[in-house]
Image (cartoon, helix red, strand yellow):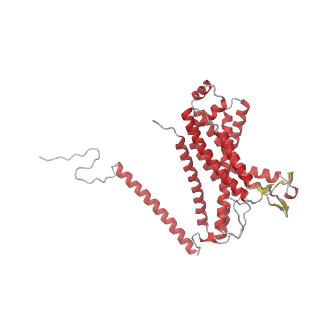
């Protein structure tokens, strides 16, 4: 009697091979291997083709050019720099200039965006409409046009250097920027910086202690005012202990520009205002949506307990809204940082501008572009890591 062999559901027959493209698991592995292989093959082709073309044109590769003299000036720099410094130091100046714009822009955009977002929910008709008008107008104008607007406002709306406005002795305002007196170099400023950092750490420790104390006893400690007193008081004590120097470096007109003091350049003002105003409009919508996401019953409960509107927003609504606000807020911080590359259009010496000058002089285009990409990637990942850590810290813990 003949025996019949039956198979069911595509499963491999006993004793047969288990490898079959009809198996979803096997098929998924094969497809992933093929995709990875294709990516590796394309990458190998691009790299080998690039190296071959560079060799044919006798173009040296590598980053040794960073040690050579840059031989070009940079109008604005956080650290000391001269044309005799290396390309590496010039690149560092560009990174610090980008970080300066990004950090200050993030802080200002967060403050303005939070205020506008809260204002959009105001019961005052005029305030709510003004906030809505700001958001709708600013969000729909490209950021590059806004940079041009702010730069033109400064460069065309202010007098030339020799006719600079002098509203206060030692303060000059012209097309070259705002020049103000600066404290002369003295070790006391370093002492004040250290004292401020100590105050920040002390305020953080104080906040944790006050939070634990409130959970244990129900008593509220005025952390905000105490922290403000520490941040002002400790540097002031260090200033007095260091001799309280009063010498100032005054700006003076020499040739076609002012020398000495501190300066707020038109380029820095334009890029900072443009990015801050533009990003704040998006942050305002993020804040508004986060507040709306909090159940209205929370507000009613706070009112039933007699808590005023201000403390209700600060202590009840915003802490809960942060869980909704933080993820999209991270994207806005990343956008502001990456949009800082638009500074090239108005002449602010940021990372892209200085790297562009470097690769034009050296011909090291690939190295220059990879350095730009690596820097922005590092900054963006740092912001993401910090914001993700903060998001997990404020997340609700299920029991």
Q: Is residue 293 among the parts visible in the rendering? A: yes
Q: How many marks?
A: 0
Q: Residue at x 18, y 46 (%)?
A: 4
Q: Is residue 34 left or right of residue 214?
A: left
Q: Quadrant of residue 266?
A: bottom right
Judge by depth and name the residue closer to the eye, 187 or 319: 187
Residue 20 point in image, percent of width and height: 31, 52
Judge by depth and name the residue closer to the eye, 109 or 391: 391
Q: Quadrant of residue 53?
A: bottom right
Q: Residue at x 20, y 47 (%)?
A: 5
Give the farthest residue toward the top.
304
Q: Residue at x 55, y 74 (%)?
A: 55
Residue 392 point in image, percent of width and height: 52, 43
Q: Quadrant of residue 307?
A: top right
Judge by depth and name the residue closer to the eye, 212 or 158: 212
Q: Is residue 359 among the parts visible in the rendering? A: no
Residue 61 point in image, percent of width and height: 57, 71
Residue 2 point in image, percent of width and height: 14, 47
Quadrant occupied by the C terminus: top left
Q: Residue at x 77, y 59 (%)?
A: 184
Give the farthest residue toward the left.
1
């Amino acid at each position: 009697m003949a025996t019949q062999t039956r198979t069911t559901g595509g499963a491999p027959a006993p004793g047969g091979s288990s490898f079959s493209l009809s198996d979803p698991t096997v098929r998924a592995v094969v497809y992933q291997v093929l995709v990875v292989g294709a990516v590796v093959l394309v990458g190998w082709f691009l790299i080998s083709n690039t190296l071959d073309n560079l060799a044919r044109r006798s173009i040296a590769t590598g980053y040794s050019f960073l040690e050579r003299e840059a031989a070009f000036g940079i109008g604005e720099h956080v650290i000391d720099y001269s044309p005799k410094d290396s390309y590496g130091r010039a690149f560092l100046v560009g990174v610090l200039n980008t970080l300066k714009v990004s950090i200050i822009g993030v802080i200002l955009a967060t403050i303005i965006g939070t205020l506008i977002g809260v204002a959009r929910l105001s019961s005052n008709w005029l305030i709510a409409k003004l906030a809505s008008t700001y958001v709708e107008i600013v969000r729909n104008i490209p950021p590059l046009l806004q940079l041009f607007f702010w730069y033109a406002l400064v460069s065309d709306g202010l007098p030339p250097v020799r006719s600079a406005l002098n509203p206060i002795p030692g303060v000059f305002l012209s097309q070259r920027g705002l020049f103000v007196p600066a404290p002369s170099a003295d070790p006391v400023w370093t002492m004040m910086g250290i004292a401020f950092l100590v105050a920040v750490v002390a305020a953080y420790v104080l906040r944790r202690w006050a939070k634990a104390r409130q959970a244990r006893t129900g008593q509220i400690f005025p952390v905000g005012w105490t922290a403000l007193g520490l941040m002002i008081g400790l540097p002031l004590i260090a200033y007095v202990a260091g001799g309280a120097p009063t010498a100032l470096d005054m700006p003076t007109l020499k040739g076609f520009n002012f020398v000495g003091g501190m300066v707020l350049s038109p380029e820095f003002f334009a890029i900072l205002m443009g990015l801050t105003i533009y990003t704040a409009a998006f942050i305002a919508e993020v804040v508004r949506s986060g507040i709306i996401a909090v159940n209205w019953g929370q507000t009613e409960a706070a009112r039933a307990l007699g808590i005023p509107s201000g403390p209700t927003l600060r202590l009840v609504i915003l802490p809960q809204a942060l869980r909704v606000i933080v993820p999209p807020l991270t994207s806005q911080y990343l956008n502001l940082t990456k949009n800082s590359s638009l500074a090239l259009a108005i002449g602010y010496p940021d990372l892209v501008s200085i790297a562009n000058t470097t690769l034009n002089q050296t011909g090291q285009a690939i190295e220059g572009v990879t350095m730009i990409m690596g820097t922005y990637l590092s900054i963006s990942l740092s912001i993401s890591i910090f914001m993700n850590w903060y998001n997990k810290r404020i997340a609700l813990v299920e029991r």
